[in-house]
Image: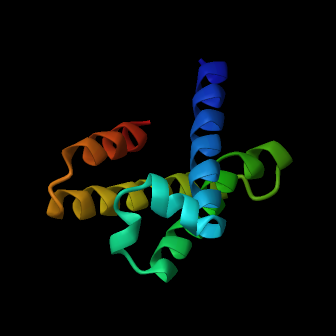
Amino acid sequence: MNIILWIVQILLAVMFLMAGVMKAFQYERAKASLFWVKDVPRGLVTFIGICELLGGLGLVLPVLTGILPGLTPLAALGLALIMLFAMIFHATRREPQAIVFNLVLLGN
């Protein structure tokens, strides 16, 4: 069971790291591939990306390095909050397909 947990945790970390890099450092690419980005201030998109980057790193690095492993659940909580706020945002815009994706990430 521990191996399955690690696999899921690493996959989630990679997903958040990839999404975070795109939002934080590749704004034009994010704008082209994420339909909501063009309607949100660039600074907010960058902030979300940095939070996703830090959260993705926080899912695996503390436990792998043995440095402050208590940060891992806090990183998971932070990412869950981002997904919750994203669901609310997409619900107000009537974007059910995006809500489903956020629910899947939140459920893991």
Residue 9 visible to an observer of this rendering: yes
Is 48 on the left or on the right of 70, as rendered? left
Residue appearing at x 58%, y 43% in the figure: 15
Which is nearer the eye, 2 or 96?
A: 96
Which is nearer the eye, 62 or 86?
A: 86
Q: Residue furthest top?
A: 1
Is 89 on the left or on the right of 57, as rendered? left
Q: Quadrant of the N terminus?
A: top right
Residue 23 visible to an observer of this rendering: no
Residue appearing at x 16%, y 64% in the figure: 92
In the image, residue 57 lies at what x, y percent?
69, 54
Colour scheme: rainbow
Q: Quadrant of residue 55?
A: bottom right
Which is nearer the eye, 66 or 102?
A: 102
Q: Compared to 83, does 97 lie above or below?
A: above
In the image, residue 67 lies at what x, y percent?
82, 56
Q: Compared to 8, does 13 lie above or below?
A: below
Count up the numbered dots: 0
Q: Residue furthest right?
A: 65
In the image, residue 42 lies at what x, y percent?
48, 79
Is 101 on the left or on the right of 96, as rendered? right
Residue appearing at x 63%, y 49% in the figure: 18
Residue appearing at x 37%, y 75% in the figure: 40
Q: Quadrant of the C terminus?
A: top left
